[in-house]
Amino acid sequence: MDGEVLHAYVNGEFVPEDEAKVSVFDRAFRSGDHVYEVQRTFNGRLHGLDGHMRRLFKALHYTRIDPRLTPEELGTATAKLVEHNARVAGPDLDLVSCQIITRGNTKNLLSGPPTVIIYTQLLDMSTLARTYLLGKRLITPGVQRVPAAALTPRVKIANKMSLMLAWLEVMALDPEAQALVLDQHGNVTTCAPGSGFLFATDGVIHVPNRRNTLDSSAMGFTLELAARLGIEIREGDYTTFDVYSADEAFTTNTKDCIVPVSTLNGLAIGTGRPGPMYRRLVTAWSEAVGVDIVGRAVGLLPAAEREALLESARSTQAMEES
């Protein structure tokens, strides 16, 4: 691979990112017929690749797509691509890597061969730093979660039109908010465009019924860390009332790791700013991956932007304490 440019992997070949192409007849383009997986780096090192490969191959089995690769082969190609692109991007930037596997060309009906793609993107540290310090606003949209009986939400299937519509509805009200999507019974499920959701009350972490949520690696890792810290975890069906009454709430995903929630539908969750449970969990995350997650994101900001953000965080805290 050329050491000056970012590359992608397309059907067995590493090519410059700008030259990566897929046919307009591919089933992913025509029907959203593909599954995918996402990882991130910390200081250029991939985290949890083996677990992500296991989840990806469960999704491939569920959707009956044969990738014609083993998890080890796909993992090796991912690691090779990330190593190259991290070197090109430089030490001050982290990446997300994504595998996309489609059923292939529509001209071949369902017989394959599949299309296999791996690519990377740079992390937006500015947005991450802001949400780590100030929290994330959530709004419940009118669009509901697709019922699990119709299509399981537990694997990363590409067709996310319902979640996209939920997110667009919320962004029309608040461009910086995410959607906390409810199921047909009014229970909270997940956040759109793609984050798990947790909340804490009286020192207990509550997890929405995982029958209706993605089998999230970041969520699983967060709960594993919480268990190590001796924090009680309960899973159940919860409504927005339960969230309004919570002390803290969080979103989790591969890119963000764990982010505090400040408000739901304009109502503050707890104090409306990162709380003690969040600090325990993000510290555990940082220790596990060997990087100060919040400090790194904030530290990479330009000086003026960093100071403005820190001042905003200090002002928010002072207002809550007064």
Image: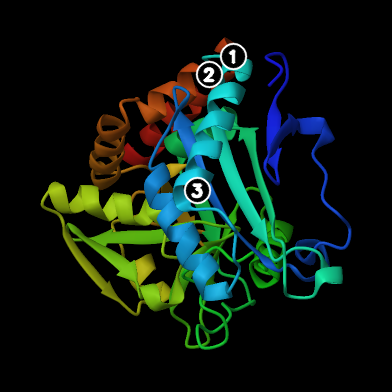
Q: What amino acid type is highlighted by mark number 1?
A: Pro
Q: Position of residue 267 (x, y in %)?
A: 46, 60
Q: Quick one: quadrant of the N terminus?
A: top right
Count neighbours of disc 1 (C-alpha within 10 A) and say few if under 14, some if 14 to 19, many if 20 or more. Answer: few
| SS at mark 3 in the image | strand
Is residue 118 rendered to the left or right of residue 290? right
Disc 2 + disc 3, Cβ < 8 Å: no
Front residue of this view, candidates 77 and 158: 77
Q: Position of residue 271 (x, y in %)?
A: 34, 49
**CA distance separating discs 1 and 3:** 22 Å
Residue identifier under label 1: 302
Query: Is residue 208 depicted above or below 18 in this figure?
Result: below
Is residue 200 rendered to the left or right of residue 265? left
**CA distance separating discs 2 and 1:** 6 Å
| SS at mark 2 in the image | helix
Residue identifier under label 3: 136
Residue identifier under label 2: 306
Is residue 112 rendered to the left or right of residue 50? right
